[in-house]
Image (cartoon, helix red, strand yellow):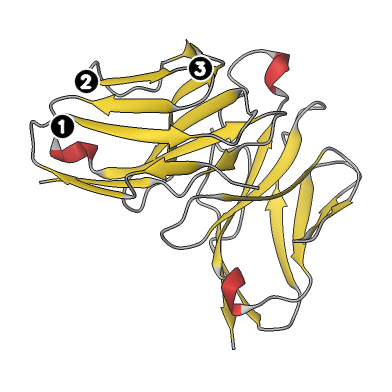
Amino acid sequence: GAGVSQSPSNKVTEKGKDVELRCDPISGHTALYWYRQSLGQGLEFLIYFQGNSAPDKSGLPSDRFSAERTGGSVSTLTIQRTQQEDSAVYLCASSAFETQYFGPGTRLLVL
Amino acid sequence: DAKTTQPPSMDCAEGRAANLPCNHSTISGNEYVYWYRQIHSQGPQYIIHGLKNNETNEMASLIITEDRKSSTLILPHATLRDTAVYYCIVRAPENSGGSNYKLTFGKGTLLTVNP
C-alpha cells in the first residue's frame, strides 16, 4: 500500500520567507510525528499529533514553527521568517499501533 | 542519555550474513527493541522490533539475549542495497506514559556491504 508521502521533496527559499511543508500519512494512521535532521546530525523530534490534537509541541525550536493537522489526516508544518539554521531535512512519520513509518522527507535549504 | 550502544561502523561482504550488535544494558521491562535503517538521502525505514522473543520477518531477524541487555540484528544475505546506517532504539509503549511516542535516534552503525 501507499506509504507516507511528503511534499515538496526539495525546497529552496530565501531567508525571511515563510515555507509550508506537507505530510500525507498512511491511510488510517491516527498518530503523526514531525522530526528534523540537520546535516550530519541525528533526528530531532518536533511535534506529535494524535488525531488532530498535538499533545506535545515541546520540540518545536521556536515560535516561528507551527504545525496543524486536519481531518485526522494531512499535516502541514509551517516555518515563518526562515533562517539559515532552519536548513535541514524535515521528516514526517505516522503510526497506527506503535510502529512509526517515515516518509522520504523534505529537504529545505534557506539561502 | 544514550540508551543504546552500537559500533560506529561495520563491513560485510555481499551475500554474507550481516550481524549488527546493540547493547541496551539499562533496558526496562516494558521497553521494546526497535531497529530502523537510513539509506543515504532517504527517510528512516522500519525493519523489525521485539520485546524478549526472537523475531523474524522478510527483511531480517532479531535476536534478543535472555537478560535483554543486548540484541543482534541479522541480515541473512546482505546486498549492496543494504548499505545504510542502522539504528537500534529502545522504547516503552506509547500508552505507558511520559513521552514514549518520541523515537530517539543515536548515531547508529554504518554498515557497508562490499562487492
Mark 3 or mark 2: name the one nearer the start of the chain: 2
Q: Which residue is mark 1?
A: A82
Mark 3 vs mark 1, foreground winner is 3
Mark 3 vs mark 2, foreground winner is 3
Query: Residue B57 appears in which quarter of the rendering?
Result: bottom right
Using the image as rendered, state which of residue B27 and residue A27 is in the foreground: A27
The answer to whether A58 appears left or right of A102 in the picture is left
Please give the label number shown on residue A71.
3
Mark 3 or mark 1: name the one nearer the start of the chain: 3
Please give the label number shown on residue A64.
2
Q: Please tell me which residue is depicted at 72% across the width and 34% down the height of the picture.
A: B26
Tell whether label 1 touches label 2 (CB within 8 Å). yes
Mark 1: give few (<14), some (14-19) or many (20+) Cα within 10 Å. many
Q: Do marks 3 and 2 both belong to one polypeptide chain?
A: yes
Q: CA distance from mark 3 to mark 2?
A: 24 Å
Q: Amino acid at mark 1?
A: Thr
The answer to whether A70 appears left or right of B31 in the picture is left
Residue A99 x, y percent position in the rendering: 68, 36
The answer to whether B49 appears left or right of A111 in the picture is right
Tell whether label 2 touches label 3 (CB within 8 Å). no
